[in-house]
Amino acid sequence: MGFDDLRRFSHARGSMPVYASAETMRDLERVFQFAFKTSNPVPYYVKPEPHTIDGPFKLGETSITPLPVPHGDLIVNGYLFSRANQKLVAYLSDCSAVPDAIVDLISGVKVLIIDALRDRPHPTHLSVCQALEVAALVKPDATYFTHICHDLPQSAELDSPMVCVSPMTD
């Protein structure tokens, strides 16, 4: 679930700050008990420093604003990183929609990093077309897709450009 990938960074500094909502922190502590609640830590494994957040916070000069977005039936946080009143990065790695209020909040951000799992709809992630629709509304300077699955072909494998078709509504 990605936590294992933090080992390299945790080892270099001796620990790893982890920022999460209370609900997410409880889940992390439950799933990764061996890291959070151990009297005999595994050498070179993640040594989390938990920080529970319930709203915007700062790390140095950077303001970090949680962005609650749906991930299927759950609400999870994406984040907006700002400095000196400039919207630098909006990070929405796990979402199945981006509410209008969040689009308004991140509008004009320099970089949008957004979930774009695959071409076909998915119950907990945006499709490529949905991610492109959000990017068109946000109008960032640059957009990067993340959480891409193996279903998407490499650009060299495409026979023709992708065409997005919005679903018909009644």
Image: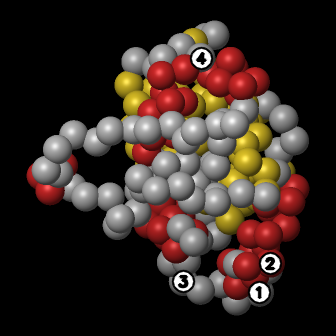
Based on the displayed image, in which of its 4 quarters is residue 68 positioned? Answer: top right
Q: Which amino acid, by three-letter code, is at mark 3? A: Pro
Let me know if residue 44 appears in the view: yes
Mark 3 neighbour density, 10 Å: few (under 14) some (14–19) many (20 or more): few
Q: Which residue is mark 3?
A: 43
Q: Quadrant of the C terminus?
A: top right
Mark 1 neighbour density, 10 Å: few (under 14) some (14–19) many (20 or more): few
* Residue 12 percent across, percent down from the top left: 46, 62
Based on the displayed image, in which of its 4 quarters is residue 154 positioned? Answer: bottom left
Q: Which amino acid, by three-letter code, is at mark 2? A: Arg
Q: At 84% across and 67% down in the image, what residue appears? A: 26
Q: Is 32 located above or below residue 2 in the figure?
A: below
* Nearer-N-terminus badge (1/2): 2
Comparing labels 3 and 2, the label whose residue is closer to the camera: 2
Residue 39 badge: 1
> What is the C-alpha distance between the residues marked 4 and 1?
46 Å
Comparing labels 4 and 2, the label whose residue is closer to the camera: 4
Q: At 65% across and 37% down in the image, what residue appears? A: 169
Q: Check if mark 1's residue and mark 2's residue have beta carbons within 8 Å.
A: no
